[in-house]
Image (cartoon, grey):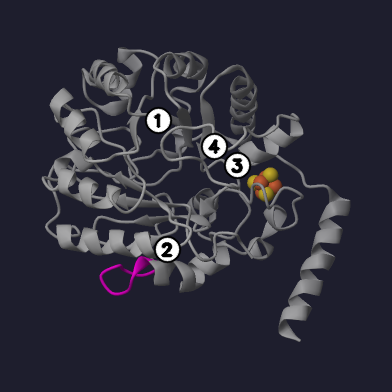
Amino acid sequence: MSPYDESPFIVIWETTRACDLHCRHCRAAAIPMRNPEELSTREAFGLIDDLAAMRPQPIFVLTGGDPMKRPDLVEIVQYAAQRVRVSITPSATPLVTGPAIRELASAGLSRWAFSIDGANAETHDRFRGQAGSFQRTLDAVGTLREIGLPLQVNTTVSRVNRKELAEIGGLVESLGAVLWSAFFLVAVGRGHVEDALDAAETEEVLQWLARFSEATRMDIKTTEAPQYGRVRRQLDISPRPHGALRGVGRAPRPVGDGDGFVFVSHRGEVSPSGFLPLSCGSVRERPLSEIYRTSPVLRQLRDRRLLHGKCGYCEFREVCGGSRARAFAVTGDPLESDPYCSHLPDPEFARRLRREDLRVAQAVHS
Ligand code: SF4
């Protein structure tokens, strides 16, 4: 099945949906106020204890909304950092002060991630819905560099900033990021379907990213565009040696929604990813480890033989498998083929794969 059947590589916890920004594409459709039903500090500790017992241990990412809106954030980071590798993705608001960054770094963070969605203040701030967000991000990055905490930069790739990507990539590199993570927009939350790249535009951007990855020292990964692995192979660009990164490291093989990757909402609902809002259970009722291993939805997502359409018989299904969130957003079926992929699978390979799947299925059920 999957090398991630027992334990995810990465667990994302939406600490809160509260956030003072109003980003154009926000997955969480965040609002300024915290929800009283958020997981409590004690429940967060329970989640962390469960992660700490998993083998291999997942990376724990605190996201939002804006995690800085939680008054118990330092306490949670301290507790987590003593048990697992933990990173954070705060919003660049006035809450991200130099002292706040230093306190969280001292609490034991392994990496800090900021979002940069435009190459300059005008485009970034328009995207983020708040004037001054771009400069505040650059100021905070200055503090991270002073204290030597590894930086990851996330960029939501959409039609709004597609033409600026080369400039954004240059900026991210100049900031000394160890990882540039390109999130391909999925129309959930406040994301607009008309802003998402189509298949041809996606292919063009992925090819550019793959070539750029050869010219830069930072690592590059994609979210909701697993075709990046296929494109790299087609362009004969070999993977980076593992272990080169500081901080939290990279997955030993590509992760997908529910397959090495799992999301816990602010109220404890578990889903394959934040972009694939299918509830698989609640950590208020069962431990995440149990939900991850036994949920029928998550188990199906980890078995790529079950994929429908061309993703099911594609020669790249193991290195790619298509974006399950994108398939769900467009068709309502998370196992459908990725509608934003322009690749046409090799027919001879597809025939062999189907025969092999049948043979395995017969062996399992005989
Ligand atoms: S057809 Fe599916 S599995 Fe193959 S490259 Fe495209 S998205 Fe990936």
Left or right of residue 204, residue 220 in this image? left
Where is residue 101, by image quadrant?
Answer: top left
Q: Are marks 2 and 3 in contact (CB under 8 Å)?
A: no
The span shown in magenta is 280-288
Residue with the mark numbered 2: 54
Q: Quadrant of the C terminus?
A: bottom right
Q: Amino acid at mark 4?
A: Gly
Q: CA distance from mark 3 to mark 1?
A: 26 Å
**Number of dots carrying numbers:** 4
Residue with the mark numbered 3: 340
Residue with the mark numbered 1: 152
Q: Secondary structure at mark 3?
A: loop
Q: Nearer the viewer, residue 169 or 201?
A: 169
- Magenta segment, principal secondary structure? loop
Q: CA distance from mark 4 to mark 1?
A: 16 Å
Q: Amino acid at mark 3?
A: Tyr
The furthest residue to the right = 348
* Residue 40 visible in the snapshot: no
